[in-house]
Amino acid sequence: MEFLQDLLEFEFLQKAFITSVMVGIICGVIGSFIVLRGMALMGDAISHAVLPGVAISYMLGINFFYGAVFTGVLTALGIGVISQNSRIKNDSSIGIVFSAFFALGIILITKARSATDLTQILFGNVLSVQPTDMWLTLIIGGLVILVVVIFFKELLISSFDETMAAAYGLNTRLIHYSIMFLLTLVTVASLQTVGVILVVSMLITPASTAYLLTNRLSLMVVLAAFFGAFSAVIGLYFSFRYNMPSGPVIALATTSLFLLAFIFSPKQGMLWKLFRPRNKKKNEILV
């Protein structure tokens, strides 16, 4: 109750609330496709690889959005070039590119700003969100949701069977890089809330939680968005009330929800598996 009163009274808390909820929603939405396509490592790579772009933006005195998006897209392209033009497999190319970008980013951030700024970028601080950050998050969120709604069928088909998608005449490579671009935008929007290191928890864990609770993709996306937003609100509450960093608290909230689903899910939970026949096959996810 006291938290609600503070939310109505303090403007900075209102901005933090709006921003964190939107971040949770868009991370859950785009994270659903990342999980289904087996691209969790790619999400981790892009979230780390935006760091040098953030550092360069600080040095040039411009909004970190531009530099972060540039390096995020450059990372996705670099991973694709290496894996498609050499014997190096995709997971190895991801490790090569993102570790190099992340290391470069830490060096640049350390030179450009103080250690305090570096910590905030790495782990996030939603309570210090600025109006420009809030509006940027809302715009990115609206764009991501709009694209997913309009191209839901294309994303669905290409996520489950790229061969079938290509047979239908879909440009699977364009779809892949479009998802990478949306992932980069979501990562940039999440920097202030959970930071570079922990954004992968918002991308993967709510979507994985939803995956345990439904076999329909449309419902999975909705549930993932809800779990992401709910975790963000829980994290905001505890970080404000007990003066804890927002990013780690939000990450732990997403993990707690996942553990509940992992144990008590009606069809996929550990308790269910103890009582169902051993030879029963897992349900395949449906539209």
Image: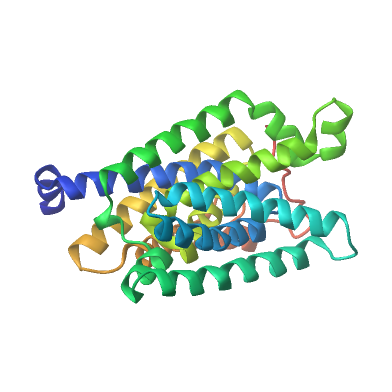
Expressed as whole percent of the image width and height from the top left, the position of residue 28 reads: 50, 45
Looking at the picture, the colour scheme in use is rainbow
Which of the 4 image quadrants contains residue 191? bottom left
Q: Nearer the viewer, residue 259 or 49?
A: 49
Left/right of residue 3 with respect to residue 184 in the rendered view: left
Q: How many discs appear? A: 0
Instruction: Tell me what residue is drawn at x 57 percent, y 68 percent.
Output: 102
Q: Is residue 61 visible?
A: yes
Instruction: Tell me what residue is drawn at x 79 percent, y 36 percent.
Output: 172
User: Is 120 situated above or below 3?
Assistant: below
Instruction: Tell me what residue is drawn at x 45 percent, y 31 percent.
Output: 142
Query: Which residue is at the far front?
Result: 60
Expressed as whole percent of the image width and height from the top left, the position of residue 207 reads: 55, 49
Q: Nearer the viewer, residue 28 or 176?
A: 176
Left/right of residue 157 with respect to residue 217 in the rendered view: right
Q: Quadrant of the C terminus?
A: top right
Expressed as whole percent of the image width and height from the top left, the position of residue 124 reads: 37, 62
Q: Nearer the viewer, residue 145 or 208?
A: 145
Expressed as whole percent of the image width and height from the top left, the position of residue 247 reads: 38, 63
Instruction: Tell me what residue is drawn at x 71 percent, y 69 percent.
Output: 96
Q: Is residue 213 visible?
A: no
Which of the 4 image quadrants contains residue 140? top left
